[in-house]
């Protein structure tokens, strides 16, 4: 097996923080899983850290997940690895604020004669 590209080396304080996080009951599942991955992958452990395959099996996670957590720790740092990245908006909004306000005002007004309510076709 090739040498690992991203090595997890945690300080004693970081290990304590992660251990507290794992042991507390009120934490998001993704944070707990990432903390467990980092604790098991830490090369400063008494056993030198577990291999990805062993971590994946013990936590019921994919090996690629373990690789991503390692990579994120090395590239973005300890505090960023536990947080989710905000999603990037894939496309620009179709309406600007003025157009949206006009559409809301129109839909809140009385529908045209002979109609009970506004339909999407009428609003378009």
Image (tube, helix red, strand yellow):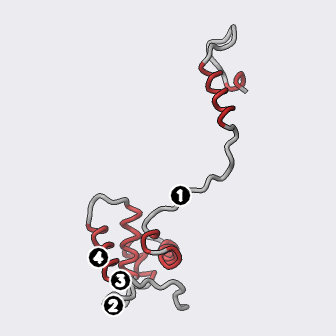
Tag in front: 3 or 2: 3
Of the image marks 4 and 2, the number of the one nearer the N terminus: 4
- Say if mark 2 contacts mark 1, CB within 8 Å: no
Label 4, secondary structure: give it.
helix
Is 54 in front, or is 104? 104
Q: CA distance from mark 1 to mark 3?
A: 27 Å
Residue 121: x and y, percent? Answer: 72, 25
- Quarter of the image for residue 108 reads top right
Question: In which quadrant of the rendered image does the C terminus lie?
Answer: top right
Point out the residue furthest to the front here.
98
- Say if mark 3 contacts mark 4, CB within 8 Å: no
Q: Residues within 10 Å of mark 4 (few under 14, many from 20)?
A: few
Q: Residue at x 69, y 8 (%)?
A: 113
- Label at residue 16: 4
| Up-down relation of residue 49 to residue 38 (above or below) | below
Give the residue number, with chain letter if any, for mark 2: 47
């Amino acid at each position: 097996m090739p040498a690992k590209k991203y090595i997890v080396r945690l300080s004693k304080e970081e290990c304590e923080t992660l251990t507290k996080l794992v042991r507390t009951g009120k934490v998001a599942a993704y944070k707990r899983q990432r903390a467990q991955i980092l604790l098991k992958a830490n090369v400063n452990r008494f056993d030198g850290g577990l291999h990805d395959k062993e971590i994946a099996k013990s936590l019921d996670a994919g090996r690629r997940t373990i690789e991503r957590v390692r990579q994120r720790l090395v590239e973005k740092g300890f505090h960023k690895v536990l947080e989710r990245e905000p999603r990037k908006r894939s496309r620009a909004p179709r309406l600007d604020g003025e157009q949206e306000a006009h559409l809301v005002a129109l839909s809140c007004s009385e529908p045209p004669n002979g109609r009970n309510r506004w339909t999407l076709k009428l609003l378009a």
